[in-house]
Amino acid sequence: MTQAEKEQDNGKEKEKERDKEKEKEQQRGVKRPIAPPVIPDPLQEQIQSNFIVVIHPGSRTLRIGRATDNLPVTLPHVIARRHKQTGQPRYEDAWLLRDGLNKAESNEQRQNGLKMVDQAIWSKKMSNGVRRTPVSADQARAYNCQIRPAVLDSSSRVKWTNTAHQPPHLVGEEALYVNPSDCYNIHWPIVRGQLNVHAGTGGSLTAVLADLETIWSHVIQKQLEIPLKDLKYYRCILLVPDICNRQHIKEVVNMLLLNMGFSAIIVHQESVCATFGSGLSSACVVDVGDQKSSLCCVEDGVSHRNSRLCLAYGGSDVTRTFFWLLQRAGFPYRDCQLSSRLNCQLLQHLKETFCHLNQDISGLQDHEFQTRLPEAPALLYQVRLGDEKLQAPMGLFYPTTFGIVGQKMTSLQYRSQGDSEDPHDEHYLMTTQSKQDQSSKSGADRKGMSRPGGGLDGEMSGQGGVGELSDLSRGCGSGSAGGGMKVEMEFGPAQGECLMGAGEVEEPLSAHLSRKTAIMSQFESKALGLDKAILHSIDCCASDETKRKMYSSILVVGGGLMFHGAQEFLLHRIINKMPPSFRRLVDNVEVITRPKDMNPRLISWKGGAVLACLDTTQEMWIHQREWQRFGVRMLRERAAFVW
């Protein structure tokens, strides 16, 4: 075959191949859909729950685990850091002690609170219809002052943490048992639900964030057995308080994504996660923690902004009050000090073991407890107690019993001060939403001006006041319905309007704002009892229908109210104090303390694990690259609550 014939055959074969390709293209053209091909969205990829870590940081306890775990790893949220220089003064964050206890008025306030507690105990009859006979502390004192401890087996002594190899830091239980004579500082990075930023040693924001990163990294590596280099394959769900410092949350997210290296994160509120964990669609969530108690009404997965309340007391205040009552009754363990970590741990245990809210338990009763301290034999003590076991937990309903003076005891939901990285923040949204409606209403109501456009809008917007004006014209209990309720829920006022009467908007705006500030500061200086705080939170809901839902589902979570009889006691106080109009409307007031027989301490964490499995969660993930590019703006765009 000549070369020309070969080339001719090759040309024919190429033509045949081209024809075949054209036929295939035509066939593909027939089958090809008219709509353009869908680009796969990386946010909709299938996510495995065992590659999601749920973190619920508390003031005294950290709960962390994979979303597939039945129970999280739980440990004291504390770190011991070795001194960098020899001879450095030792520093330790307080556990049960706090500011405001050593004022001149503290003891008088404590005594007045105790009188109110005793009056409440006497006024409520027992289940058999008989009034409870009060027991004097002097009756127990005479017995307790004679008690001497019995020595137990000395071989079961507790030991201090071994620091011979001089580790740079120790975490959790190991940090609690560091010998005070060793060269270590003890830090609790979170206090009353906020980062523990203070003027003392290790109190800077950078130092607190470093403590958090060290504790969490240690637990992830040692307890969850996840190498830190593999965190790029993992995602994180972070639970935060409803009322929080947004700047601090931003820094924590930055630490988790950029420093620790998680690939993506979801930030969600503790109260909403508590409803997920308990299987409720709506509830008034009462979270009584160790150092703070927070309340919020949650409806269909949305936290009602106006109902948020944070009280600066919790289980540790009950423990400290119980110690004070024990001392009045001649507590036989006379070396007990609130400045000692191990003594604080013992007092927490005694509170959880002895205290209750069951008024049917009365009279003097004998108990025993053990002390196991390093470098000392184990001792067995006898103690006789009366009303002290009931008086201490009732401090949650009469907070003056705690003797805290000059401290801000109630925090409300304030509007964010804004962030330079987020120009289209809440202030921008408030100023631009429904501008024409606001201008026409304010023009008609406040100035009586009929010209188009309402000149007030132009004047106020120049001063950045439209958002404030729209806030002041809405009361939190106005009962607005429909779309108005959504606006109320998302962009509601800063809670102060709940405390003022209607019609006050007619006064000049500056005077109104000054009055509002004065009322707010007066309100926040008071320590609301837990029952009154629940009623206040529910009353700040927008509609009567929502309020009825909340009364019928009061969910108590956290470890601060885990006393025998707490459910019945709280229910009794709510029913007696709720508005008479709602007693007729609400079919059944229900207080839920152990949904699905779960530990109340774990419900919010469990809700975070449930959140990881929901289909609607997919669009809430903030990826590492997005955070690097857009920063805090991603929280406003992706968070399931108004950032």
Image (tube, rainbow, N blue to C red):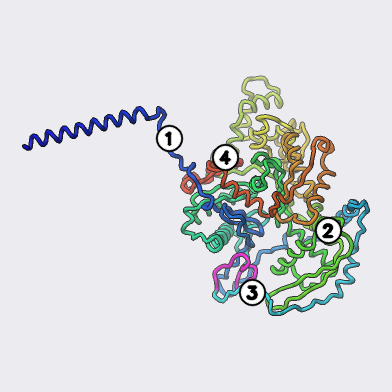
Which image quarter: residue 372? Answer: bottom right
Residue drawn at x 55%, y 53% is: 53
Mark drawn on residue 425 = 4
Q: Which residues are magenta?
A: 166-184
Residue occupied by mark 3: 160
Nearer the observer: mark 1 or 4; the answer is: 1
Quadrant housing the C terminus = top right
Mark drawn on residue 390 = 2
Q: Name the residue nearer the viewer: 3 or 346.
A: 3
Residue 608 location, x and y as percent? 60, 49
Neighbourhood count class around disc 4 (C-alpha, 10 Å): few under 14, some 14–19, many 20 upward = many
Neighbourhood count class around disc 2 (C-alpha, 10 Å): few under 14, some 14–19, many 20 upward = many
The residue type indicated by label 3 comes to: Trp
Residue occupied by mark 1: 38
The residue type indicated by label 4 comes to: Asp
**Marks 4/2: CA–CA distance:** 48 Å
As for residue 189 lying within the magenta part, the answer is no
**Marks 2/1: CA–CA distance:** 65 Å
Residues marked 1 and 3 touching at CB (< 8 Å): no
Q: Is residue 146 above or below residue 387?
A: below
Neighbourhood count class around disc 1 (C-alpha, 10 Å): few under 14, some 14–19, many 20 upward = few
Nearer the observer: mark 1 or 3; the answer is: 1
**Marks 1/3: CA–CA distance:** 62 Å
Q: Name the residue nearer the viewer: 594 or 111.
A: 594
Element assignment for label 2: helix
Element assignment for label 4: loop
